[in-house]
Every structure is written in C-alpha cells, then in structure tokens.
Amino acid sequence: MQIPSKYNPSTVENKWYDYWMKHNYFHSKPDEREPYTIVIPPPNVTGILHMGHMLNNTIQDVLIRRARLLGKNACWVPGTDHASIATEAKVVAKLKEQGIDKNDLSRDEFLAHAWEWTEEYGGVILEQLKKLGCSCDWDRTKFTMDDDMSEAVIKVFVDLYNKGLIYRGYRMVNWDPEAQTTLSDEEVIHVEKQGALYYLEYKVEGSDEKLTIATTRPETIFGDTAICINPKDERFLHLKGKKAIVPICGRVIPIIEDEYVDVEFGTGCLKVTPAHDENDKILGDKHQLEVVDIFNADASLNSFGMHYEGQDRFVVRKAITKELEELGVLVKTETHINKVGTSERTKAVIEPRLSDQWFLKMEELAQPAIDAVLKTGDVKLFPKKFENTYRHWMENIRDWNISRQLLWGQQIPAFYYGDGKEDFVVAETREVAVKLAQEKTNNFALSAEDLRQETDALDTWFSSWLWPMSVFDGIRNPENEEIKYYYPTNDLVTGPDILFFWVARMIIAGYEYKDEKPFENVYLTGLVRDKQRRKMSKSLGNSPDALKLIEEYTADGVRVGLLLSSAAGNDLMFDEALCQQGKGFGNKIWNAFQLTNLWEVADIEQPNSSKIALEWYEAKFQSVLVEIEDHFSKYRLSDALMAIYKLIYDDFCGWMLEMVKPAYQQPIDKTTYEKVMSIFEDNLKIVHPFMPFLTEDIWHYIKERSPEEALIIAKWPESKPINQDLISEFEFASEVISGIRNIRKQKNIAFKDAIGFSVVNNENVNSTFDEVISKLGNLESFEYVTEAVEGALTYRVKSNEYFIPMEGSIDVEAEIKKLTEELNYTEGFLKSVQKKLSNERFVAGAPEQVVAAEKKKEADALAKIETINASLASLK
C-alpha cells in the first residue's frame, strides 16, 4: 500500500467520515450489549457552530467513541431545538425584507413561512458538527417540532393540567417588547447600567404642600395609582388619609401607609404603579388600588400616556423629563447605577407586565429532582461545586410561566367555548375538546367550529425538558423497546448556564414520567473565553470561525486544542496556539508511523536492548492506561488527554522508538517490529476518541483491514499487571542517558564518535538498562568501577558517579582555553560582588532580601570557580 509522505487532513477527514457513515458505525439499535447513551443538548435550529458547541460536542464525541471501543452499544442522539423566540425573529425579519407584515398573516400562513425557513436554513449546525468528526446516530436526528415530539409535549400538558398542576393566572410577568412575549425569570439577564434618579414633586390635594418622590422611570407616572409612606415616619403623619395629584395627567391618587416603605431610603415616599412593578403589584393588591397599564405590547405608551401615545418608552423618558422640568416639577436628577433586566434572546429591556398566562406548579414536582442530586446521588454533577447552585435554584423554585405569545411552537391545547376566563377545556385534540365542552356546559349542540384554541404557544423549554424521553418515544409509548433499553441515558454534557433552564427540568420530568432519573452524570463545561478572559461573542469580534479553525489546524488538532485547555466547570481560555499544538501532535504521530514504515524488517535475532525497551513501554503503557481510566471516571478529559499526549510524545516517540530503532542502513528484527506495531495500534486506540481521523487513517495503513476491523469499533486495550520496578529503573536510566547527551552537547562530541563510560554504582542500580544506555549513548565500553576515574568528565545521578574518559573524546587544548575564559569571567564577577558586600553603607542600608541575593551570588560564584578549577586540574 502506497503511504503518502505528508498527511493531508482535508482529504483524510472527508474520506473517513464517509467511510464511517457508509458502514453505519454510528447507528445503534437495541441488542444484548450494555447500552451507552448520550442525548445532544439540541442547538437552536437557527444556530451555526460556535466555540461553545465545538467544546461541548467534542467532549460528547470523545465519550461516545470511547464507549464503542469498550464494546458498549453506543447511541448518541442528535437534534435541534425549534427555539421559538430566535426562530420567529428570523422569520419575521425575512418576511419584512419581502414587504410582509407578520400581523397580516394567519397562524397557518405564518407557520408555513416558518417551516420553509427551517427547511432552508435550519440544521446547518448539524452538518457542521460532521466536520468536527461527531459520530452521532444521524438516523435518529430529532427536531422538537417533529409531529411525534409535538404530540408528546401536548400529551404532557394535558396530563399535568388534569393533575391540577397547570393553571391559568393573571400575573406580573417578564415581557420582552421586541419579541412581544413573556419570558421566564431564567431568560432575563440582569445587566448593570448607568441611569438617573429623577426627583419629582407631587402636590398634596387641597394644600400648598408638595411631596418629593424619587424614580428611575418618570414615564411611568401615568400609571401611578397611589403614594405610599411608612406609618411610623413622623415626617408624614399629617398626610394620613389625604390625596396627591400626579403631575401632567392630574390624576388624584390616595396616600397610603405601609411598612414596606424604607424610612431611610430615598425621600421616604414611594410612588405605586401596580401595573409595572412586581412589588407595587403586591402593594396594590393589599390596598385594593386601581391598576393602570400604560404600555402597548411593543412598550410604546397607550392612550393613558396622553400626548405621548404611540411613542417608545425611552423616547418618552427624555421628552417627559424636559416637560417636568419646564413645569417646575423636576427638582433634581442624580446619576444612578442599577441592574436592568434584559432579554437573553433579543437583548431588549424587559418590561414587568400584568398578563393572563399559563403556569406550571413546580414545588411538588421539584422534590424528587432535589433528592436525586442532593440526597441519593442518583444524578451526579461534575464538578460537584455546582450542587450548591442547583440547591439554591431548586429550593427557591417558582411556578413556571410556560406560555409564550408566539406562533412558532406547540400551540397550547386549551379550547375556549365562551368569553369567560374559565370557559375552556384542555384536550389533546379538538375532537376530544368538543366532547369535554359539551359535557361541561351540558350543551350537546356545541361543535368544533364553536371552539377557538388558545393562541399562545408553549415555552420552548417545555419541549426540551422531555428530550431524553421523547427522542425514544417514551411519552407516547412508555413501554416501547427503545425507551426500556436506552433510558436512563448515561452522560449529559452541557453548560452550567442552563443547569436550571434545562438540566433540572429534565430531571423533574424524568421522575414525573418514568419515575427514574433521565441520566446518571452531568458533565458541566465552562464558558469559552479568549486569552483576555472575555466571553467569546460576535459583538466583541473575538470568536473565531469554527470551520476556518478546522481548515487551518485540522479537525483533530482543534479537538485536541479545545480539550487541552478545558477542565470541567472551569472557563476555557481559548488560544489558537493550542490548536497548533494539537496539529503538531498529529504530525508527531504521523512522522512516528512514517519512521516505522521506512524500516527494513529481517528475520534476525532480537537485541536485548530492544527486548527491554518493549517490556518497559508495555509497563509504562499499562500504568498510564490506569491513570487515563481514572481520569475518565471523574470526567477529567483534559487530564486524560494530557496523560496520553505525554505517553505518546515523550515515552513512545521520544524514547521507545529511539531505543528500538535499527542502526543506520541496518534492518530491524521481525520480533521487535511486530511488537512495535502492536504497541502502535494500542496507542491509536487510546488516542482515537480525541483524534479520530488521523488514527483511523494510520490504522488502515498499518495493514489492510475489512470494515469489521475498523478502528472505530476496535477493542480498547486490555489491562495487564504493571511492572513498576521496570518503570522506576528506566526513570533512573533516562537520567543517565540525558547526562551523556548533555556532556556530548557541551563538549561538542558527535554522536557518531563512540565513547568510554564508567560508573561507581553507589545506588546499587540493576544492570537491566545497561544495553539501552550503551545504545542511546553510543558507548564503546561500559564498566563498573569502585573509585573515581582520573582525567575524565564526570556527572552524578543521585549518588551514582559517571565518568567519560577525555582522551580521544575532546580537544583538550580547546577545552582548557574555554574553561580558563570562563574562570576569568567568574573571578571578575566574584570581585564585583565582594566589593559591594564589603561596603558597610550598602549592607546597612539595602533591604534584607537584596543583601541576601548578593550573598547567594557570592556563594554560587565560589562554587563555580571550585568546579572549573577541578576540571582544569583533570585536564593538565
């Protein structure tokens, strides 16, 4: 077989991915083997591959490929999430380009456009994952809006409603005025922003007195329905029962009392706007205040905003500030820093808004999921530190707002038969809804046309919390063969930012619908940051193009680069230099294979040095194998990779191949060669999960193999007893060899020139590696002596003394000249240091550590002079 001199990644990567796909290695179906299952965290259907996806999916692929090598039935289910807010925004933007307004379309017309967009642009990210080498079972690819997935979602909604866990309520919600939908608390990011505190005067009705109130949002005065004071605040006792007048709109509002008001904060007076602040709403309910909603859905002011009607809230803020100032109502403004809620998806500033929404009661549902992580340990988080975050979220859980004012998503299966808030039924189909409505109203003349379905869609997370079950049809067909075989899944790899959004909710759903955990282990990756510790983002321009990285550094190189810098739960400081290191590692392995390929093999006797070298590497390999498997068990993939890297780069390429390499233009014995290639194959097996393309390529170049013998389905190396003595003896021998090499380098003794070698064996070291030392040091003789050899170069390893005769090894005159020059320089340096130390003013005035440093210089110089003099004496 013709082996190319250079590794060509672009050709190789396409070749082997096509080969794997052609032979169906990624596909899994239930059989007698132990299953190993991972479900992908479904990326948004709108998404393209970014560094976070690269890291997350590389880790999953490493785990799934290793499981295959361990003989497990590995199943990695891929798919995408319909991402209601993000996708709808993309579709709306595309329609706008075509001159179409979403509001002019029926639901079905809009959904037709959404499906068209999804089919054209959606799923790009899954194709990109193939470039990274991800070995997903593509036959199982799921989409959260697939018919069967949607059926499962609707089935769960109806079930939870019938259990009394889903209800419709008028609540204060987080409103995204750009997407024009509610958001859960977890979808709101609180960003610190600089704003202003506006001090406004409200007249007290029937008097000349004025109350000063501080607010960050002067535009909301149109929604004021009370002023609140603390009943114990002596400054305002005389105002009990009185009323105030709101500036501009002139609304007369009551002055109420409540201990909620902090006497020490601000002016001690609080304006109450129940429609636009959660705490104000609580006060409003308590004191039965009027609720005045001043905003339209897009956060422009409605008719309550008077002459500001139709204008955006932030435009109004500027204009009303000017108007209040002209009216003499604005007393002053101060700079104010506060945390502003913003939409995770659209980045719009969130508006608290009262709205009829659907909610899921969470407290009762959450308890089994709390116990699974924090009590029984049935679900383990890696790293463990995230248990505290999980505990905080889960023990303070609030009811989940599961409705969204969107068209793209599963439509809530509630059917209204009247105008009242309770005039509805919940059913999986309209046909069942008709029967329920007939029974509820006792009106059997009701027909499907008399019912109108709830227009809200379900929160996207309400689909994905069922993911580990729904991908195996475990909701619709709970006893099917696949859910029984693959569930619970084994490992989940995701980011800590969705620990509550998704991970906790999947655990909740798992116990509710399977009475079992959805997965055993959760590996939480860190965020990918740049070298300056900044989070990677398009806006900062610090996020590299994932596919260009693969093109430049190879898929294997990028995978290694990502994992060399990533430990579970810790942010990854990404540096392209690590991808270059990964590419370099691939080149090292390729070059090592090329070296073995150049050897001529002969049926000759095996040298003892080769026999010992192979035995040592076998012991070293087994030792590292134990280390690797320990790292994998603790999800320390970066540590596992580093152990493999050092084993192959240093021990295999740096030492073992050198030890067994035949002399120039000489053949290698067949026994050694076959063992080297067997070792090479074991090396490829442990590297394969991290570098699948390169390893599969070399695997097939080593010898012709059938599809049943491909590396991707080979057998992980077996554990064997470890000869620790051999490992320890080699560690000592390697220092001896390094000593010889250092002297050769220092004294310019070419390797082709054989040298003599003697040792005073004070350490009683075994002679096991003597022949290896002789070979790698090119020694013409190796003898044990009882005392120092006169006129020889010397060095120590522990208490052992090693001697290399100078005669014939070095140019004595040149060495004397070199040492004399070094002696003169060192003596001059010593004089300058001693002069400084003899200066009493310096010693008395300089900091203690400076004086100590000078004394150390003196001691080092004296020791060096002694060594040089000894060397000169031996040369003369």
Image: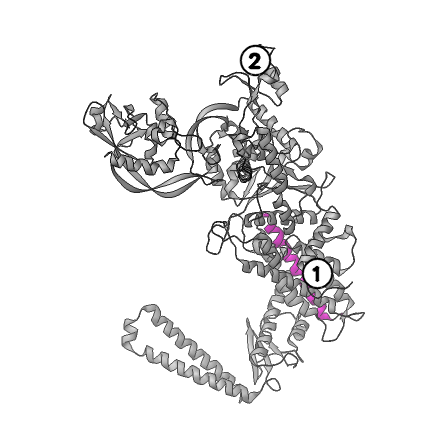
Closer to the camera in the image, 680 or 259: 259
Magenta run includes residue 631: yes
Residue sitting nearer the eye, 743 or 299? 299
Looking at the image, is 160 positioned above or below residue 332?
A: above
Identify the element where label 1 is drawn.
helix
- Give the residue at x 29% y 29%: 248
Does 434 appear above or below 700?
A: above
Label 1, on which residue? 680
In the picture, residue 729 is in which quadrant?
bottom right
Helix, strand or loop status at disc 2: helix
Q: Residues within 10 Å of mark 2 (few under 14, many from 20)?
A: few
Q: Looking at numbered disc 1 in the image, what kind of residue is underneath it?
A: Phe
Give the magenta range: 606-633
Q: Which SS does the magenta portion mostly show?
A: helix
Residue that sits furthest to the front in the current view: 99
Residue pointed to by mark 2: 440
The relative height of residue 455 versus residue 444 in the rendered view (above or below) is: below
Percent coordinates x, y for residue 79 in the rendering: 63, 40
